Amino acid sequence: MRLVLVLLALSPVCSLAAAQVRPAIRDGGKSLNFTFGGFGGFGLTGTGPTGGVGISYFMSPATAVRVGLQARSHSRTLSWNSPGGAAGSDGSESGLNLGVAVDYLKYVGVATSRVRPYMGAGVGVIMISNKSTPAAATGSTPTETKNAPGGITTPGFFSPGMTFDLHANFGAEFFLFNEISIAGEYALNVINRNSPADMEAITGGTTVATKGNPTTNILGFGAAGATVRIYF
C-alpha cells in the first residue's frame, strides 16, 4: 500500500519533468555522438553500431549529416619461454584498425517530440593491418609476418586490408534532457567490398608475398548499438 501511495505521489512530478523536456534541435545545431556496441555483430562503420565518436550537423530539425571515426590499436610482447632454459629472444605482435563513415539521416515526426525515429544511408571505409614476429631460440631466424589473413591473436583484430561499404541506417532516439539523448540503431550492409592486403612472410632477407582475393557481399547483416548524443 505504501508503494502505491509513493508511486501516486511521484506520478505528477514525473509527468511535469517529462513535459519540460524540449529537444534542442535547430537549424545549424550539432551533436557529439558516443557509440557503444554490444547488440549485434562486428563491423567498423564510423560512429556506427560497434562504437566510436563523431559529430552530427543538422541542416534542419529533420535532416542531419553525421561523420564518425573509430580507431583501435594493439601491441604486446610474446615472451620467450623454454622448459630447458635455452636462450632466446622475445617476439611481438601489433595491429591497427581505423574506420570512418559519413551518413545522411532523415528524422520522422516533429522536432519537439522526445522520441525521434530516423533512417538514413551512408558510406564507410575500414583499414586493418597487423604484424607479428614469434619468439625464437638464439641462433634461429624468426619469420616476421605482415598482414596475416587470420588476423592476430587478440580478439577484434580481423583480416587486414581495406573494406568499403554502403549501408542503410534505422534507429530512434529518446531525449532524457533538452540537450542529451540516447539512441538505438541498426545498420544494414547494402554493399560490402573487401580488398585484402597482401601477406608478407619475411625470413632473413627473403620476402614471400601472397595476394588475397577481393570479395563483394550484397545485403549482408550489419550491426546494432547504442549512442549517447550531446547537443550544442
Image: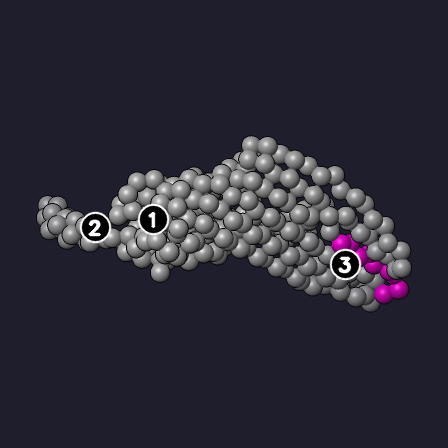
Residue kind at label 3, given as amino acid type: Thr
Among numbered discs 3 and 2, the one appearing first in the sequence: 2
Say which quarter of the image contains residue 216: top right
Q: Which residue is the site of mark 1?
A: 61
Q: Please check the rendered image and state whether residue 141 is part of the magenta-colored stretch, yes or no.
A: yes
Q: Please check the rendered image and state whether residue 27 is part of the magenta-colored stretch, yes or no.
A: no
Q: Position of residue 15 (x, y in %)?
A: 16, 49
Q: Residue at x 69, y 63 (%)?
A: 77
Among numbered discs 1 and 3, the one appearing first in the sequence: 1
Q: Are marks 3 and 2 in contact (CB under 8 Å)?
A: no
Q: Is residue 47 above or below residue 81?
A: above
Q: Residue at x 32, y 52 (%)?
A: 25
Q: Which residue is the site of mark 3?
A: 133
Q: Which residue is the site of mark 2?
A: 18
Position of 141 with respect to 166 (left or right) is right
Q: Nearer the viewer, residue 90 or 161?
A: 161
Among numbered discs 2 and 1, the one appearing first in the sequence: 2
Q: Are marks 2 and 1 in contact (CB under 8 Å)?
A: no
Q: Residues within 10 Å of mark 1 (few under 14, many from 20)?
A: many
As measured in the structure, the alpha-carbon distance from the residue carrying label 1 to the one carrying label 3 is 52 Å
Q: Nearer the viewer, residue 218 or 74?
A: 218
**Secondary structure of residue under mark 3:** strand
As measured in the structure, the alpha-carbon distance from the residue carrying label 2 to the one carrying label 1 is 20 Å
Q: The magenta stretch spans which residues? A: 138-146
Whether residue 21 is visible: yes
**Secondary structure of residue under mark 2:** helix
